[in-house]
Structure formats: structure tokens, C-alpha cells
Image (cartoon, helix red, strand yellow):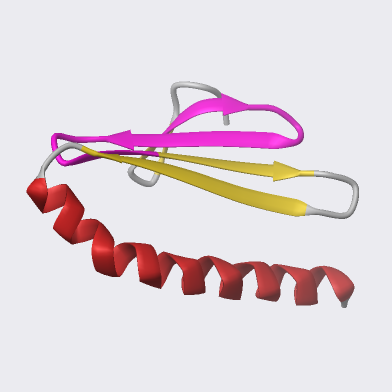
Amino acid sequence: MRAGDKLDFFLVEYVDAQTLVLTERDRHLDVMTCISTGEHSVAVTSSVRVHNLFGTLYMIPVGIAHKWIVRGMLKHLRQTLAA
């Protein structure tokens, strides 16, 4: 994988051994997600820029749901790595 590739609907903006930066832009919102790893840690950071009312309304339930989805995925990753 390298910058410029597509990962599902995301564009890979940057990738190295410890960092993956993904973006998706449309007329309603821009999303950037960074996944980074350390020796004993994984961090997921997302930023959303809303462009209009539809983007704002869309982000209300999505913002809540993504918090729980990412927590569950990271918990699963932690359990898998500990096994």
C-alpha cells in the first residue's frame, strides 16, 4: 500500500511502518483518519469538517456510533495480540 491507493472508499494520503493516514472528501464533509502505532500502543484519530446541513445531520448518529465501533475494534485487537 502506498500514497494515492484506495482502501475501500478512503484515499491513502500517507503510509509508513507506524502511520496510516486516510481521507474521504465529498460535498457534505471531509474526513481524515490517522492510525498510528507505538511499541505498545495503537492510536486512532479522526477529524471531520462539515460543509452543509446534510453533513451536520449525518454526523450526529455517526459520531456516536463510531465511538463505540472503534472502541470495540481496538478491544478485539488488544485481545488478539494478547493471545
Residue 16, magenta (yes or no):
yes
- Residue positioned 36% across, 62% down in the render: 63
- Residue positioned 67% across, 75% down in the render: 76
* In-image side of 21 versus 57 (left or right): right
Snapshot quadrant of residue 64: bottom left
Where residue 15 appears, as percent x and y from the top left, is 62, 28
Where residue 8 appears, as percent x and y from the top left, is 38, 46
Residue 73 sits above or below residue 49 on the image: below
Boundaries of the magenta span:
11-31
Q: Where does the N terminus fall, quadrant-wise?
A: top right
Residue 8, magenta (yes or no):
no
Q: Where does the C terminus fall, quadrant-wise?
A: bottom right
Residue 24 sits above or below residue 39 on the image: above
Q: In the current view of this chain or complex, which residue is farthest to the left?
A: 53
Snapshot quadrant of residue 58: bottom left
- Say how many tags the image has: 0
Where residue 5 appears, as percent x and y from the top left, is 45, 28
* In-image side of 78 versus 7 (left or right): right
* In-image side of 58 versus 9 (left or right): left
For the stretch drawn in magenta, the main secondary structure is: strand
- Residue positioned 54% across, 66% down in the render: 70
- Residue positioned 56% across, 47% down in the render: 45
Residue 4 sits above or below residue 25 on the image: above
